[in-house]
Structures are given as structure tokens and as C-alpha cells.
Image (tube, helix red, strand yellow):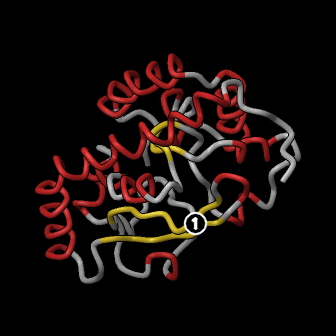
Amino acid sequence: MSLPIAPADKPYLKLKYSLDFCFALLMLVLLAPLLLLVALIIRLESPGKALFTQVRVGVSEKPFCIYKFRSMVADADKKGPVLTQQNDPRITRFGHFIRRSSIDELPQLLNILKGEMSFIGPRPEVPSIVADYSERQRGVFAVRPGLSGWAQIHGRDELDIPTKLNYDLEYIERVSFGLDLQIFLRTFPALLSKRGVN
């Protein structure tokens, strides 16, 4: 598939997959007790599965199933809009905590192991939003989507979609190990500030 933008450092992207796989495997082993505890609390607080799955669009516009800890009541998509609203009543009490701390994103370590995601890259969107992307905005599909990214450390959910995409395209044009390391180190202060999280 032809995309309107090319990553800056293609050799690094090949190495990046191996780094992602090894680090994700290590993180899953180290975080296993926490992941099990979070899953248990979710099940105790609200009926339904601990994991939430949703179709997102990944590299080369290939759809994949993203994993998250469920932070809303079961079947929330049938009880309101697709996108989460400010003070959304469908979010559970524990759900507010895991969303603000981004613990709900940890199951995406499985997506990284499967090669569908990376630690750093554009956040993947649902097909209904992707359908409205311009030709230039489709450039975000040149790389695997990430747990965190250039847009995430600049405002997360408080950014509108065009602004997010501009940051993501800038990232792809500049992608390198140094930039990924910078984003990784700046992700934790962004999480602690809880800025831009619904």
C-alpha cells in the first residue's frame, strides 16, 4: 500500500520490533501480579469480563483487536456514544482510577508481543474515525501504533483529532531511537500529571 509519508529511520524500525518484543515479554512477567489483581478488582466491582476488546486500525491500515482493562460497565458501547465523554457515567469507580493512571492500557503488552503495536507510535483509532482521514493523515499508518507517542505527551485526550494527527505525522518524519527514548521518558510525567484524560 502506498502511503503519503515515509518513516525517517527505516533500519531503526526493523530493530525496534525486536526491542519491543523483548521489553513487552519482560514487562508481562514483572507485572503479572498487578495485572491479575486489577482483573480481579474489575470483576468484583462490575459484572462482565475484565478485558475489553475493540477493533482499531494499525500499520498499513490493517485492522486488529486492541486489548484494554474494562473501565466501563459491561456493554457500554450499547449504552452511549463510541467515544468517551467528559464525566461519562458509564465509567466505574475503579475505572476512573485505571484510566487516569493508564493501567487500563497495560493489556496492550499482548498487542506488542503479537507485533500489532509498539511501545512508541501513533495511538490507534477506530475504523469510523479513520474513515474521515485525509490522504496526508493516512501517513500515520506507515508505522505500528503505540502505547504512548508524540501526541500523548503533548496533551493526550484534550487534543482534537487533527492536532493529534499532526503530532503523529511529525513523529514519523523524525522517528529515531533518540526520539523514542525522549517520548518514553516524558510519558511518565504526563501520566502523573493526569493531564488530558477523560
Q: Residue at x 57, y 33 (%)?
A: 151
User: Horizontal and vertical percent for residue 43?
Assistant: 19, 76
Answer above or below: position of 121 versus 79: above
Q: Residue at x 66, y 34 (%)?
A: 168
Mark 1 surroundings: few (<14), some (14-19) or many (≥20) residues within 10 A? some
The image shows a total of numbered marks equal to: 1
**Residue 94 appears left or right of 18:** left
Location of the N terminus (image quadrant): bottom right
**Residue 77 appears left or right of 4:** left
User: Horizontal and vertical percent for residue 91?
Assistant: 35, 64
Determine which residue is flagged by label 1.
64
Q: Residue at x 17, y 73 (%)?
A: 45
User: Horizontal and vertical percent for residue 153?
Assistant: 48, 28
| Residue 165 in which image quadrant | top right
Q: Residue at x 49, y 44 (%)?
A: 118
Residue closer to the observer: 181 or 98: 181
Q: Amino acid at mark 1?
A: Phe
Answer above or below: position of 72 versus 79: above
User: Horizontal and vertical percent for residue 40?
Assistant: 14, 70
SS of the residue at dot 1? strand
**Residue 56 appears left or right of 24:** right
